[in-house]
């Protein structure tokens, strides 16, 4: 799996909660590569509500987690979330166009240190840091589900160091 020629990132799989077009309960993220970052717009609605008019914090975390899954596609690394930390800076308002941005801050063997932000126009709504750990095909075989064909090309262990993304572009 890799970004398409136009920079858009294909869904992880059709039923992915974050980006799968066939998941009626999903967030429907459409991600794309912008230089060394991944971006996506997100509009949340009453299905995602916590306090009245505000998005549930877990939904915000899910969106950032799946965005990091888009960074994996950009990097060409199969990995899973080991740790996800979110700082909520302002309420995420339902019906607003929110912008997600994610990038790889650094890597260390199997460890990928990813960072992301959620903005509402100029307002910083949330920022996240995550540790992802590279995995191979055996990790995903544990579910017993059929893997998408294109995942097979991803699922070789990768130990090589990745260059850090550029400081801020
Ligand atoms: C073809 C396309 C394929 C696409 C493929 C893409 C992926 C797929 C996308 C699906 C869409 C994405 C959506 C968003 C991403 C999810 O949502 S992923 C789902 C949520 N995450 C999980 O289910 C992961 C569950 N956890 C695990 O399976 C295992 O704990 C892990 C993370 C694989 C690590 O286990 P392990 O391989 O046995 O490694 P382990 O030796 O424990 O740790 C390795 C190193 O990491 C450190 N470490 C591990 N966990 C932690 C932690 N929580 N905190 C700090 N350090 C830690 C260890 O200390 C160790 O450090 P060193 O001793 O080497 O210095």
Image (tube, rainbow, N blue to C red):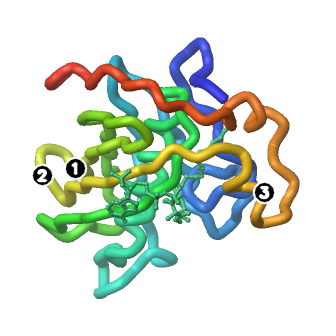
Residue that carries the numbered disc 2 in the rendered image: 123
Give the foreground label among 3 and 2: 3
Badge 2 crowding class, 10 Å Cα cut-off, few under 14, some 14 to 19, many 20 or more, is few
Name the foreground residue: 65 vs 137: 137
Image height of 78 relative to 19, above or below: above
Which percent across, then down, holds residue 30?
Answer: 53, 41
Q: Position of residue 51 (x, y in %)?
A: 29, 87
Residue 104, given in percent of the width and then of the height, sits at 31, 35
Residue found at x 44% / y 64%: 62
- 122 left or right of 61 in image: left
Q: CA distance from mark 3 to mark 2?
A: 41 Å
Residue placed at 26% from the left, 51% from the top? 118
Disc 1 vs disc 3: Cβ atoms closer than 8 Å? no
Can you identify the residue that label 1 sits on?
Answer: 119
Say which label, 1 or 3, has the lower sequence index.
1
Q: Nearer the viewer, mark 1 or mark 3?
A: 3
Nearer to us in this view, 161 or 86:
161
Q: Is mark 3 within 8 Å of ligand 1?
A: no
Q: Are there few (<14), some (14-19), or many (20+) residues within 10 Å of tag 3?
A: few
Give the quadrant of residue 112. Answer: top left
Viewer-proximal residue, 27 or 139?
Answer: 139
Question: What number is the disc on residue 141?
Answer: 3
Element on which disc 2 rests: strand
CB-based contact (under 8 Å), mark 1 and mark 2: yes
Mark 1: give few (<14), some (14-19) or many (20+) Cα within 10 Å: some
Quadrant, the C terminus: top left
**Is residue 166 positioned above or below 62 on the image?**
above
Q: Quote the CA–CA distance across marks 1 and 3.
A: 36 Å
């Amino acid at each position: 799996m890799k970004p398409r020629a136009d920079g858009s990132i294909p869904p992880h799989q059709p039923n992915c909660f974050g980006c799968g077009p066939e998941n009626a309960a999903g967030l429907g993220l459409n991600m794309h590569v912008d230089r060394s970052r991944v971006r996506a717009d997100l509009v949340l609605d009453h299905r995602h509500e916590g306090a009245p008019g505000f998005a549930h914090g877990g939904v915000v975390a899910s969106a950032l987690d799946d965005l990091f899954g888009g960074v994996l596609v950009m990097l060409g690394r199969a990995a899973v979330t080991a740790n996800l930390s979110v700082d909520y800076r302002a309420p995420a308002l339902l019906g607003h166009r929110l912008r997600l941005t994610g990038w790889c801050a650094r890597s260390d063997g199997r460890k990928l240190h990813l960072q992301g932000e959620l903005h509402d126009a100029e307002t910083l709504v949330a920022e996240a840091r995550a540790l992802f750990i590279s995995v191979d095909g055996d990790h995903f075989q544990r579910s017993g589900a059929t893997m998408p064909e294109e995942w097979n090309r991803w699922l070789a262990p990768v130990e090589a160091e990745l260059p850090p993304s550029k400081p801020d572009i």
